[in-house]
Image: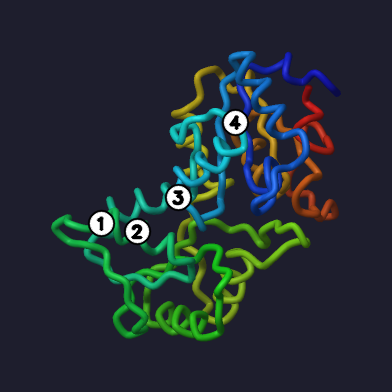
Amino acid sequence: MNRLWEKYDGFIFDMDGTIYIEEEIIEGAVETLNFLIKQNKHLLFVTNKTTQYRKDYANFLISNGVEISSNSILTATDNIVNYLTAERMGKKFFAIAETKFIEKLLAESYGQNSELEFSDNPEEIELIIITLDRNYTEKKFEIAAKALLNGAEFFAANIDSTCPIIEGEINDAGLIISDLEKRTGKRLKKHFGKPSRTMIEVIKKKMQYKKSCYLLLGDRLETDILMGNKMGVDTALVRSGIVNDFNRAVAQPTYNIESIKDIL
């Protein structure tokens, strides 16, 4: 089980719950990543969390001693922003999301011929976007529900049910999506994080070697490991993040390990 680092030329890492939880680095993660870098392994970092920008994630790892580039970080935020600014310009949207996510979406469309516009009026909202929102309220839910019933399109940056925190887990986008689907009868049209086809294609474009040369590591069966299964890469489920429901046979990891340091 150990010395998995010798078997693979590339490693695809989930971030929150695998490398760190909130602002706390998981024991051995920095040493493991730096060892792989010194061995000239190709590293990619993939996150569904939308509360910061890609450069923020890179700066956090750099500040903790991991010398990486923001170009090696792939986010659900960038994926959905790229899609909406290419395919839905001029639309009015409402997002159950945190401020940085909304600001990113507005900033990327600013100055173009037809900008995206934020609205909390259900009568004029054309797009509903769901992601992690630690300031989620019943009022936000009602706005989204009414807009969906009025015909708004239904998108999500990610579909994680929970997000790991130091004390355990908090509710994430997946639970809000489920509640909105039950309330309105409308189904989610598209999402852009793990394990979506969009994220898979973004990762594939970044891979330097064939898929048999990569190991994907993450803490969540239904996003990380399922995406690895869909991609056809080997996977390692770590136990440093969320608690998985193993009664749900949603995906099968190649390896089960305690944390990423166990690949050394």
What is the three-letter code of the residue carrying label 3? Tyr
Mark before the other along the chain sequence, 4 or 3: 3
Mark before the other along the chain sequence, 3 or 2: 3
What is the three-letter code of the residue carrying label 1? Ser
As drawn, 244 above or below 211: below
Q: Position of residue 177 (x, y in %)?
A: 57, 69
132 left or right of 215 in image: left
Mark before the other along the chain sequence, 1 or 3: 3
Mark before the other along the chain sequence, 4 or 1: 4
Distance (Cα) linking label 3 and label 2:
11 Å
Residue identifier under label 3? 53
Q: Which marked residue is nearer to the observer: mark 4 or mark 2?
A: 4
Q: Secondary structure at mark 1?
A: helix
Distance (Cα) linking label 1 and label 3:
16 Å
Q: Position of residue 113 (x, y in %)?
A: 13, 57
| Circle on res. 66 | 4
- Can you see residue 253? no
| Circle on res. 105 | 2
